[in-house]
């Protein structure tokens, strides 16, 4: 068994923490685990991706387009950009947040007005959540990434709920544990 | 104990376990985090040197002085450090020394795609190529053993993907080492031609012995033995991708990649019907295997440029099988998505400088750092960029070529100390009159805020002398030195107007801290008063990511999460609509 996860978004959105929690949960579940992070030029505002793989034997930290069991995106249209990485039947967990690129602000390109329709069409299995709004309701907008993590966890095999929660406890500061557990459960619908 | 480490964390761990007592380097993606991690361990001295040449020479001094030493850099850093490396190969070292070079196939963050194995051949030094964080640790330890076995430095070659991927790594405790007292021996350590000729012969003998030893080294060179129809020869992470992509083939993974293990290559080739060399970068291994009289596939099915990702390896597999290959393409719904180019952060002082420069008709020669992003619209204020320190020297040459527009050469503060000073000295000495600018944000920002000789702090966390850019420039003979805060748009404009037309050498220090480093400089977010805003879009000419217009007809708004309150947009708004 092997599970491939592609996380995407825009720099500063917290996808690296999500990758860290997945890796910790998979290690605790006894799997071989690799992660790979691509920062681009490390500036704010650029596209960021992270790969996570776990399973019985993992050779390489990268995988091929079309092989992701789950893609998770912290920004609505970034999910479309990487849609072809998802395998048939795979799960897409997408935040409704829209971040306007500078190319749109300068009038050189358009942010698609029909992003919702496009996402619904491209992803038969879609968890489409207003992560920032829901995180704010739970007490802190910064937990948006953990809500998305909860949502994406529904598409992954081999990691039971208690292990996910153990991993969150291990990866966030003690004072934020309870809030993040609530965020995770909200995303996971538990 | 098992730890989930990145390649760079594992390099640091391996070096520490191997008893490294001193480490030197200059920041450069993807190598930077090695020293940042190593400095957290006890009993090891670490420093950021001003440039890679200084770092390598210091590491050489330490290794000849009897302690195990490490030097780290990115691929282009080795261009700067190659001079001492060539001679060090002749003199050799006393205690182990590792030169860690991180290549960047795919050019994620480098101006060139260099294959460091060429340098290994030129310098006649062994090179090890780990493919995973597990090997980053174990190969680092082996590299020190090999270095001491042959009394020569060993190059460990990483790549972006190896340095930035995490694996579960089994770690051990440190093996402390005694310093080996230095014994004077000029015929070894002073390579005057007389002695150099003898050393030269010894280097050739050393390489012959290494080729035999690497052939027998089953720790560094491993074989995934499967079928006998196809044999793949590869190295680094690509070899691991091949092991996954080709379950039917045997894979020889070379960890000791040079000098080539001829005996091992011959034996492996004889065990398979067909051989394919799948290597990232140049066909170095392939050409050598052919020179042994072994027929093989190589660059006939493998791209020369870019990273060999699993998808590329799958396309090679298809080509070897004579099958068509059709990877999934981006969906139609993504065809018209707006791109997200990297850009200067909201509140970045470089933006203020480039905005001021955009008001003049000038040629700008730039340099390596965040400010290279000044080339992008809407600022578009970089016309030529080559390498570290080149901002000053290119401007000098351009001005000597008779360019009629004023020529402005820009370097950053860390770049000034890296290799900008000699260019400034040359400009004054040879009577150039380009306008030089240090865009001084008080840190090495692009690589994640490392200290440098101007920050007053060392990598060990100690306070130290902060080198004074003004004083250095004056000591080089620069008479006109002006220091300006670039957020004072009016003052910056005045200074530029004067200096661009003064007809003599001139240095402007544009000084304001990197907003990501100096969090205390962040002010409350500004907002646009929609009633006052006439939608003239003057503020959008700044290219600030905090200024958004979801639709080009709409008035801009400020994203309060991104805005740092720098005030640039407020200053350029003709209707005083932003406060």
Image: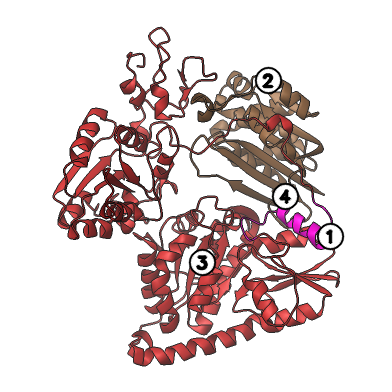
Chain colours: A brown, B red
What span is in magenta? B304-325
Label annotation for residue B163: none
The mark nearer the N terminus, 3 or 1, is 3
Mark 2 or mark 3, whichever is nearer to me: 2
Q: Both on one chain, marks 4 and 1?
A: no
* Label 3–label 1 contact, CB within 8 A: no
Disc 2 marks which residue?
A114
Disc 3 marks which residue?
B15
Disc 1 marks which residue?
B322
Question: CA separation, marks 1 and 2?
Answer: 42 Å
The chain letter under disc 2 is A
Mark 3 or mark 4, whichever is nearer to me: 4
Q: Secondary structure at mark 4?
A: loop
Mark 4 or mark 1, whichever is nearer to me: 1
Question: CA separation, marks 4 and 1?
Answer: 22 Å
Is B175 or A150 nearer to us in this picture?
A: A150
Q: Both on one chain, marks 3 and 1?
A: yes
Disc 4 marks which residue?
A63
């Amino acid at each position: 068994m092997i599970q491939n996860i592609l996380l995407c978004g825009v720099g500063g959105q917290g996808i690296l923490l999500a990758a860290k929690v997945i890796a910790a949960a998979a290690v605790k579940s006894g799997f071989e685990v690799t992660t790979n992070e691509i920062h681009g030029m490390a500036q704010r505002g650029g596209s960021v991706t992270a790969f996570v793989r776990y399973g019985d034997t993992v050779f390489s930290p990268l995988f091929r387009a079309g092989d992701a069991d789950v893609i998770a995106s912290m920004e609505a249209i970034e999910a479309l950009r990487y849609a072809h990485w998802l395998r048939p039947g795979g799960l897409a967990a997408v935040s409704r947040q829209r971040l306007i690129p500078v190319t749109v602000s300068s009038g050189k390109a358009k942010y698609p007005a029909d992003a919702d329709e496009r996402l619904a069409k491209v992803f038969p299995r879609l968890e489409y959540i207003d992560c920032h709004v829901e995180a704010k309701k739970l007490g802190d907008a910064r937990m948006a990434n953990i809500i998305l993590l909860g949502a994406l966890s529904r598409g992954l095999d081999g990691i039971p709920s208690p292990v996910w929660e153990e991993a969150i406890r291990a990866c966030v500061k003690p004072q934020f544990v309870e809030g993040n557990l609530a965020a995770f459960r909200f995303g996971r619908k538990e | 104990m098992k730890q989930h480490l990145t390649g760079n964390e594992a390099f640091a761990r391996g070096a520490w376990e191997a008893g490294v007592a001193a480490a030197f380097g200059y920041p450069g993606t993807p190598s930077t985090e090695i020293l940042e991690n190593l400095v957290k361990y006890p009993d090891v001295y670490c420093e950021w040197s001003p440039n890679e040449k200084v770092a390598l020479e210091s590491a050489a001094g330490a290794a000849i002085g009897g302690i195990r030493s490490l030097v780290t850099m990115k691929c282009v850093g080795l261009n700067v450090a190659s001079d001492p490396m060539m001679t060090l190969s002749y003199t050799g070292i006393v205690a182990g020394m590792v030169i860690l070079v991180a290549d960047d196939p795919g050019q994620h963050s480098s101006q060139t795609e260099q294959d460091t194995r060429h340098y290994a051949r030129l310098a006649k030094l062994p090179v090890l190529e780990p493919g995973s964080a597990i090997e980053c640790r174990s190969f680092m330890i082996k590299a020190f053993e090999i270095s001491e076995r042959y009394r020569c430095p060993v190059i460990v070659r990483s790549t972006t993907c190896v340095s930035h991927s995490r694996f579960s790594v089994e770690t051990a405790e440190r093996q402390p080492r005694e310093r080996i007292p230095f014994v004077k021996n000029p015929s070894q350590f002073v390579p005057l031609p007389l002695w150099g000729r003898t050393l030269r012969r010894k280097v050739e003998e050393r390489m012959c012995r290494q080729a035999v030893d690497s052939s027998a080294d089953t720790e560094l060179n491993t074989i995934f033995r499967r079928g006998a129809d196809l044999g793949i020869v590869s190295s680094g992470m690509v070899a691991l991708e091949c092991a996954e992509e080709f379950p039917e083939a045997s894979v020889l993974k070379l960890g000791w990649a040079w000098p080539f293990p001829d005996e091992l290559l011959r034996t492996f080739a004889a065990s398979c019907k067909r051989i394919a060399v799948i290597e990232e970068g140049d066909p170095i291994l392939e050409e050598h295997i052919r020179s042994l009289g072994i027929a093989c596939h190589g660059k006939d099915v493998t791209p020369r440029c870019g990273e060999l990702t699993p998808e590329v390896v799958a396309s090679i597999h298809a080509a070897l099988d004579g099958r068509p290959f059709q990877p999934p393409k981006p969906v139609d719904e993504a065809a018209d998505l707006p791109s997200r180019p990297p850009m200067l952060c909201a509140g970045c002082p470089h933006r203020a400088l480039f905005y001021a420069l955009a008001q003049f008709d000038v040629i700008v020669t730039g340099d390596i750092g965040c400010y290279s992003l000044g080339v992008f619209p809407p600022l578009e204020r970089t016309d030529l960029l080559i390498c570290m320190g080149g901002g000053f020297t290119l401007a000098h040459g351009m001005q000597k070529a008779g360019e009629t527009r004023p020529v402005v050469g820009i370097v950053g503060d860390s770049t000034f100390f890296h290799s900008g000073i000699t260019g400034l000295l040359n400009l004054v000495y040879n009577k150039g009159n380009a306008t030089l600018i240090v865009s001084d944000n008080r840190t090495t920002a692009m690589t994640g805020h490392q200290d440098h000789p101007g920050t007053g702090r060392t990598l060990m966390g100690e306070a130290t002398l902060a080198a004074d850019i003004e004083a250095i420039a004056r000591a080089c003979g620069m008479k006109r030195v002006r220091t300006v805060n670039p957020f004072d748009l009016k003052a910056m404009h005045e200074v530029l107007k004067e200096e661009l037309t003064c007809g003599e050498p001139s240095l402007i220090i544009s000084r304001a801290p990197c907003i990501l480093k100096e969090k205390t400089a962040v002010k409350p977010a500004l907002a646009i008063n929609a009633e006052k805003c006439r939608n003239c879009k003057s503020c959008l000419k700044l290219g600030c990511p905090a200024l958004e217009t979801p639709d080009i007809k709409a008035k801009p708004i400020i994203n309060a999460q991104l805005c740092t309150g720098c005030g640039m947009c407020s200053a350029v708004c003709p209707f005083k609509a932003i406060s």
